Amino acid sequence: MTLATRVIPCLDVSNGRVVKGVNFLNLKDAGDPVELAAKYAAEGADELTFLDVSATVDNRSTTYEMVKQTAEQVFIPLTVGGGVRTVDDVAKLLSVGADKIGINSAAIANPELINQIADRFGNQVIVLSLDIKRSERMPSGFVVTTHGGKRETDLDALAWAKEAVSRGAGELLVNSMDADGTQAGFDLELTAAVRKIADVPLIASGGAGKLSDFAPAVSAGADAVLAASVFHHGIFSIREVKQALADAGVTVRG
């Protein structure tokens, strides 16, 4: 049986509000996260992803309350990332209604954290978020970045993705920092490269701008497609994305 391709709106949250910019710069207010989550769920979103882009200890209570309110209103899987540094952080987010947890910088700083989360909660809880840029200094041509793409690590993106999966990451969120917010299309080469080395579900992120951008990402190996600004700005709806995918022969949920 062919699994349906998931369509996932991403809500970048800062201080309790949804924000969006280009390449994580010039962030502008895009609305209330709980209201937007309910709207997208009603439109047919298969899952929702919240990324707290300004996560600090001070902001934790805001995030927990936002997740709790969303989970009470929205009954589709909810992934929450940003500022997750410990197993206890994961436990708290799951307790207020998150279904999956996105981790990025903390896993880079301490890869063993992936093993610890997987051992306690199961692989299906972990979504490893990969903010990737092209780089000639890496064997694969891709480097892992942190801090919204501002800092390059010394990690080859494909080698890190492979290690993370071996440690227990149950899903990979592959975000092209070169394409993010540009609406110029997904990075198909990056998607295909990660697909070759990872056997877990892969979410393509970064660059959606036209309805015709989504099906090629699935052809390149994505199990799910994620977008933000095109939904926040009303360029097109989730239903329109699903229709475009169906018209291209991709199986989607109704």
Image: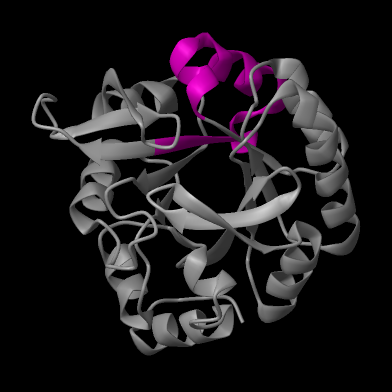
Q: Is residue 69 left or right of residue 38?
A: right
Image-based side of 201 in relation to 248, left or right: right
Q: Is residue 5 visible?
A: no
Please identify the dominant SS of the magenta region.
Answer: helix
Q: Quadrant of the C terminus?
A: bottom right
Residue 65 on image: x %, y %:
88, 43
Residue 172 lies left or right of residue 98; in this view the side is left
Magenta region includes residue 177:
no
Q: Which residue is depicted at the point 47% across and 80% down?
A: 241
Query: In front: 236, or 32?
Result: 32
Horizontal and vertical percent for residue 5? 48, 67
How many marks can you see? 0
Please give left or right for residue 248 compared with residue 187 in the image: right
Q: Is residue 111 magenta?
A: yes
The quadrant where residue 73 appears = bottom right
Q: Position of residue 139 (x, y in %)?
A: 10, 26
- Which residues fall within the magenta stretch? 104-130
Q: Is residue 33 above or below residue 62?
A: below
Any part of residue 94 in sight: yes
For the point 80% across and 60% down, the residue is: 34
**Above or below: residue 116 compared with residue 250:** above
Q: Residue at x 45, y 76 (%)?
A: 251
Q: Position of residue 95 (x, y in %)?
A: 87, 34
Q: Residue 52, located in which quarter of the rendered image? A: top right
